[in-house]
Image (cartoon, helix red, strand yellow):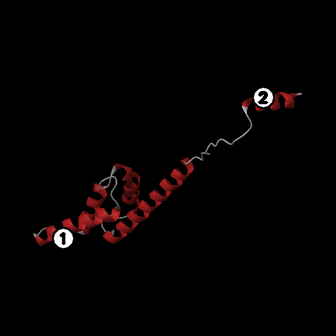
Amino acid sequence: MHDNESISDMFTCFTTIINSLKNLGKSYPNQELVRKILRCLPKSWTPKVTAIEEAKDLSVLPLEQLLGSLMTHETTMKNHENVEVKKKKSIAFKASKEDSESDEDGYVTLITSQF
């Protein structure tokens, strides 16, 4: 899986490869497919992979349940990124120059206001 690739895109590619291998006579048990998917995830997914490995029994974990869990995590990560981007946005005001009195009149007004 590439860093910018979604889980569903990765799973589509994975399924295509697995189906091609089945056509050639090579099949894998569900447990091995689950482990292969967890291994192919990028390093940014390491905490989620560790959590799945520790919380679930990989020998009986259905591929669909793994996919659902990974897609949920992906959505959560995207939501957190969107919140961080919104927090980082700053407001900039456009400067405008209004037609006002000349600079000399401004100095006179400033001196007068100080008295």
Locate residue 28 relative to residue 96 in the image: left or right: left
Q: Which mark is residue 107?
A: 2
Q: Is residue 62 visible?
A: no
Q: Position of residue 65 (x, y in %)?
A: 36, 70
Q: Label 2 sits on what residue type?
A: Tyr
Front residue of 87/44: it is 87
Which residue in the rendered view is the most extreme toward the right?
115
Q: Which image quarter is the N terminus in?
A: bottom left
Locate residue 15 relative to residue 85 in the image: left or right: left
Residue at 47% from the left image edge and 60% from the top image edge: 76
Local secondary structure at mark 2: helix
Front residue of 56/99: it is 99
Q: Position of residue 59 (x, y in %)?
A: 30, 66
Q: Is residue 86 visible?
A: yes
**Residue position marked by numbered label 1 in the rendering:** 19
Count of all numbered marks drawn on residues in the image? 2
The residue carrying pointer 1 sits among few (fewer than 14), some (14 to 19) or many (20 or more) residues within 10 Å by Cα, namely some
Residue at 39% from the left image edge and 58% from the top image edge: 54
Locate residue 5 relative to residue 85 in the image: left or right: left
Q: Is residue 21 above or below residue 114?
A: below
Figure quadrant of residue 22: bottom left
Closer to the chain start, of discs 2 and 1, is: 1
Between the residue at mark 2 and the residue at mark 1, the CA separation in whole angstroms equals 82 Å
Q: Position of residue 63 (x, y in %)?
A: 31, 69
